[in-house]
Amino acid sequence: MANNRNKRRKPCIPHTGKTNSPLRFGWISSNWSGYARAGGKCEFSRISAEWNVPFVLPSSKSSYSSTWIGIDGYENSNLIQTGTGHDWVNGRACYYAWWEILPDVETVIPFPVSPGDRIRAAIYRINHIRWCITLHNLTQNWTFRTVQQYSGQQSSAEWIVEAPSVGNSISRMAIITPVTFSCCRLNGRSPGFVTKEKGIMIQQKQVVSIPGEPGSRGDSFVVKRNE
């Protein structure tokens, strides 16, 4: 179960990375790492992906992490998203699933989540204001679905590992095992990821989390926690 402190994912205001950096990335954030695609208004109507829930390793202080897909939030203040949470709180690991539409805080999905579970997530537009959010735990054989109203710009799409906000501050990123995103789709097709869409997380001048290069099909990548 999730701990009882309300968490909120925050939009990303990226800083452009140096193209000659040996890390080979396109943008920097204090709370996001992964791949983000920017486009025009109402360009993105469907996003999906699969990943395995990472293991959380012990840390000296409480720490938090989320893996999710979403539409909007990259260079704009709206966001519709769903994913999994993996935190270290009060000396133990905590795993759960959630969905969220900013500016509201997360809504926890009341089904079990364990490290290693295979997750399939999708968000898609039904009509101009109604959207469907689905999360399927393939390992534990449950499916959650909800239809919500959303009227954001639909001008960006993301596959992200995040250090969520707890209270009003971006949290300390949990120490987690690598997260592999696969079967990523955008508007029903492979996104064809490119390096300039890759963002790394930097907190207190340290690289905290960084995604690898896209897979050969352009629809997969691995995010690693940097120690």
Image (spheres, rainbow, N blue to C red):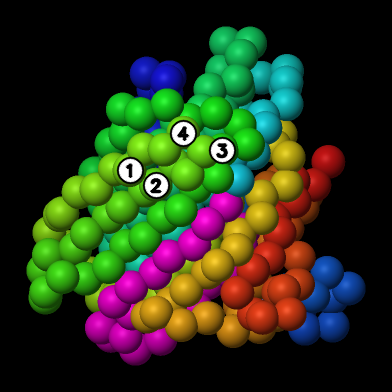
Residue 144: image x %, image y %? 29, 43
Q: Are marks 3 and 1 in contact (CB under 8 Å)?
A: no
Badge 3: few (under 14), some or many (20 or more) residues near its Cα, within 10 Å?
A: some
**Residue behind mark 2:** 136
- The residue under label 3 is 117
User: What secondary structure is the magenta-colored segment mainly?
Assistant: strand
Q: Tell me the amino acid under the disc marked 1.
A: Thr
> In the rendered view, would you say 167 is above or below 79?
above
Q: CA distance from mark 1 to mark 2?
A: 4 Å
Q: Please name the residue shown 11% across and 74% down the image.
A: 127
What distance separates the C-alpha of mark 4 from that of mark 1? 9 Å
Q: Quadrant of the C terminus?
A: top right
The answer to whether residue 19 is seen in the rendering is yes
Nearer to us of marks 4 and 3 is: 4
x and y percent of residue 181 in the render? 61, 59
The region drawn magenta spans: 33-51
Kindly indicate the quadrant of the structure image that contains residue 20: bottom right
Q: Earlier in the sequence, mark 3 or mark 1?
A: 3
Residue 35 shown in magenta: yes
Q: CA distance from mark 4 to mark 2?
A: 9 Å
Amino acid bearing label 4: Gln
Left or right placement of residue 47 versus residue 195 in this view: left
Q: Would you say the residues marked 1 and 2 are in contact, meaning their CB atoms lie under 8 Å apart?
A: yes
Residue topped by disc 1: 143
